Amino acid sequence: MIGLGALLVLMGAVWTLQGLGFIGGSFMSDNTTWAIIGPIVVIVGLALAVWAARRKT
């Protein structure tokens, strides 16, 4: 579950950067929708990783 959380954080970061136009070459580039969805996915990933880490100990 920690790995899944980390993957979501990475994916959300990429989506955010694409939505803000820092990473080009995709239909997501310069699209405000992905600049909003990305940070939400990052937060969900962080929450999942923290929850899994606390549950494990």
Image (cartoon, rainbow, N blue to C red):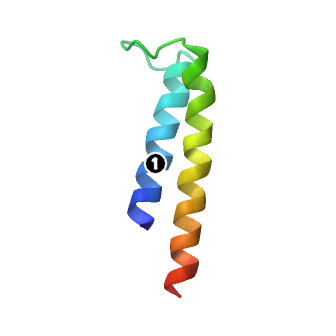
Residue 3 lies, in percent from the top left, at 39, 62
Write the residue at 51% across / 72% down: 52
The total number of labels drawn is 1
Write the residue at 45% across / 20% down: 23
For this rendering, which residue is in front, 13 or 32?
32
Write the residue at 54% across / 62% down: 48
Q: Residues within 10 Å of mark 1 (few under 14, many from 20)?
A: many
For this rendering, which residue is in front, 12 or 17?
12
14 relative to 46, above or below: above
Q: Which residue is mark 1?
A: 8
54 relative to 33, above or below: below
For this rendering, which residue is in front, 24 or 31?
31
Q: Quadrant of the N terminus?
A: bottom left
Residue 9 lies, in percent from the top left, at 50, 48
41 relative to 44, above or below: above
Residue 46 lies, in percent from the top left, at 58, 57
Q: In the shown orientation, is residue 10 left or right of residue 50? A: left
Residue 43 lies, in percent from the top left, at 62, 49
Q: Work out which residue is located at the far bottom of the displayed protein and give it.
A: 57
For this rendering, which residue is in front, 6 or 51?
51
Q: Secondary structure at mark 1?
A: helix
Report which quarter residue 33 is drawn in: top right
Write the residue at 45% across / 44% down: 10
Q: Amino acid at mark 1?
A: Leu
Q: In the shown orientation, is residue 4 left or right of residue 9? A: left
